[in-house]
Amino acid sequence: MKRYAGLVLLLLLVKGCATVEVSYDFDQQFNFAGIKTYDWLSVPEKTPWNELTLKHINYAVNNELQAKGLTITSKNPDVLIAIHGGKEKRVDVQEWGYAYDDSNFYHGGYFPGRLRTDAYGPGHTEYRRGTDTYEYELGTLIIDIVDAEKKSLVWRGTAVGVVEPGRTMEQINETVKKMLANFPPVQK
């Protein structure tokens, strides 16, 4: 039974951790329809990602923006793109427990009036409990889009989710696609 409780817990954790929460906000006064070109701001020196991860993020953002009709240029771009974020190690601790009634029913069938006569005595109930831990990394990716002329933030997308080792490039592509699905924002 302990094996099944651990399996159910693991499946719930994997299902719960597989999602990435995405949100965005933007300047309602900015004219997003006027954006045709973009360029990159330099990445801060202190970054939680290695060089390859930064390249994956840059590549994914470029693909999404170019699919939306934007062109990258260093000569007088309309907006500038900045990326930043972080990673945090987390531990999820789950306590579990159950009771097992080792009654006459489980020893040779149920016979009214028959009592167990072993060392535990009649109607012995056994209690089982334990603790399972799950270690993971929670990552945050922030994409800022800045008005190149005024140097003011006009759009921010944020993604928070569990970093899955071995899925870095695939996970980055999926996450960036979700984040930029709302760019440019629909203005009323």
Image (spheres, rainbow, N blue to C red):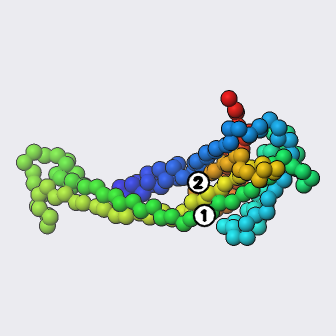
Quadrant housing the N terminus? bottom left
Quadrant housing the C terminus? top right
Please report the residue visible at 35 percent of the width from the left and 60 percent of the height from the top: 95
Q: Is residue 59 shown left or right of residue 86?
A: right
Percent of width and height locating residue 4: 40, 54
Q: Is residue 182 visible?
A: no
Query: Mark 1 vs mark 2: which is more N-terminal?
Result: 1
In this view, the residue farthest toward the top is: 188
Percent of width and height locating residue 92: 45, 61
Q: Of 61 and 171, which appears nearest the observer?
A: 61
Q: Is residue 117 shown left or right of residue 182?
A: left
Amino acid type assigned to the residue bearing label 2 in the image: Gly
What secondary structure is found at the residue carrying circle 2? Answer: strand
In this view, the residue farthest toward the bottom is: 45
Residue denoted by label 2: 161
Please report the residue visible at 58 percent of the width from the left and 54 percent of the height from the top: 161
Estimate the spatial distance between the alpha carbons at disc 1 and disc 2, rounded to whole Å: 10 Å
Please report the residue visible at 39 percent of the width from the left and 54 percent of the height from the top: 5
Residue denoted by label 1: 87
